[in-house]
Image (spheres, coloured by chain):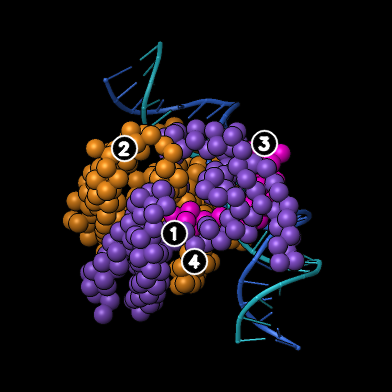
Chain colours: A purple, B orange, C cyan, D blue
Amino acid sequence: MTEKSRTKYIVLGIISIKPATGYDIMQTIKNSTNYFWSESEGQIYPTLAKCVSNGYATCHETTENGRNKKIYTITKEGQQLLKSWLEEKPQRNSVRNEFILKLFFAKNVYKEKVLEFIQDFIDNHHKELQELELLFSTLTSSKDPHQPFWLATLEYGIAIIKAELEWAQRTITNLNLE
Amino acid sequence: MTEKSRTKYIVLGIISIKPATGYDIMQTIKNSTNYFWSESEGQIYPTLAKCVSNGYATCHETTENGRNKKIYTITKEGQQLLKSWLEEKPQRNSVRNEFILKLFFAKNVYKEKVLEFIQDFIDNHHKELQELELLFSTLTSSKDPHQPFWLATLEYGIAIIKAELEWAQRTITNLNLE
DNA sequence: CATAGCATGTAAACAGTTACATGATTAT
DNA sequence: ATAATCATGTAACTGTTTACATGCTATG
């Protein structure tokens, strides 16, 4: 956990909702933030250990169903760190969209290949849209105090995907790919 | 330039259009790919040197207006490498949107702060939209053979930004921020 | 005559992913 | 039995940014 890595904030954010294990945190990321923030496994456990050594979290070891678990709980210091980060102006992120980069240089690529890529893009985005809409329908009935914010981020994901799908259809026509 | 870094592909892609200096490449990225692919300065020069040592580009030193320049030209091998990469299925990129991450955890943030962040988001996206629309108007009249693909990527950027702006306005209402 | 832009580059620090190792439980 | 899931962790590698160093030319 170095100065600038934001991994600690998503970790602290998740355990601020409810104490959790490293595994739980990874599941939460996979199931509910993955469409706007992803983390790889190799970051979570070291970050949790460093949060404990820096006093931002405490660790409680238990055994549940014969499984050893380490349940992490946020401390007052962790809450303060999280809150002060949340109140800082968000930083712009570097963007890297490999699909669009390939399209940018697609002049010498066979039209069939370009069409194939756009159709894959459409398929993947359709699947993702379905997943987000499923999430949406479960979230709408939730009474969790976080719900309005989670709904807003989910609507963000859905809005982007819909715009991408519409663009992809138009682009197949505009590039005369079919 | 290691195995997986994609920096070499954007570098080769740009010099495949027209021989260029490292500085030119940075300008091109800043002016025309930055909304979907960014690179930092410290990557460009070492990548160019390695492209030369790997036979993907050649380097020609000249002096222009008293300035020393190194003009890089793509080789046949470079063109082949670029083309074979372009024809591989695009890889998904990891997503990291700090603004949305902060909104996800915004329950304990003052409403005024949340509103401020969304308004900054709107301002920044308005500016970016204007820049892209300016680019768009110059591109539409271009007869460059790359034009249809550049236009498609530009339309992608514009579509996303418009969707984001609409979402932001709805979200101010939905979260009762005003 | 100062500031912005043109032009090239490196070193150190920082960040992140991949692959592996281990072993238990639950479902098929 | 065996595959999937739960659960924790590390090492090595890969990739990226930041800050610095240098010096020239064009513009106001």
Q: Is residue A36 left or right of residue B143?
A: right
Q: Nearer the viewer, mark 3 or mark 1?
A: 3
Q: CA distance from mark 4 to mark 2?
A: 35 Å
Q: CA distance from mark 3 to mark 4?
A: 38 Å
User: For the residues tagged 3 and 1, is the chain the same?
Assistant: yes
Q: Visible in this render: residue B70?
A: no
Q: Residue at the location (52% across, 57% down)?
A: A29
Q: Residue at the location (27% across, 54% down)?
A: B163
Sequence-wise first label, 3 or 1: 1
User: For the residues tagged 4 and 2, is the chain the same?
Assistant: yes
Q: CA distance from mark 1 to mark 4?
A: 15 Å
Give the structural element (helix, strand or loop) at label 1.
Answer: loop
Amino acid type at image mark 3: Gly
Highlighted range, magenta: A33-56
Q: Residue at the location (40% across, 45% down)?
A: B103
Q: CA distance from mark 2 to mark 1?
A: 23 Å
Q: Nearer the viewer, residue B75 or B13?
A: B13
Q: Is residue A109 left or right of residue A67?
A: left
Q: Circle 2 marks a residue in which chain? A: B
Amino acid type at image mark 1: Tyr
Residue at numbered disc 1: A35
Residue B91's label in the rendered image is 4
**What crowding class fits label 2: few (fewer than 14 Cα within 10 Å), some (14-19), or many (20 or more)?**
some
- The image position of residue C2, as x and y in percent, is 40, 14
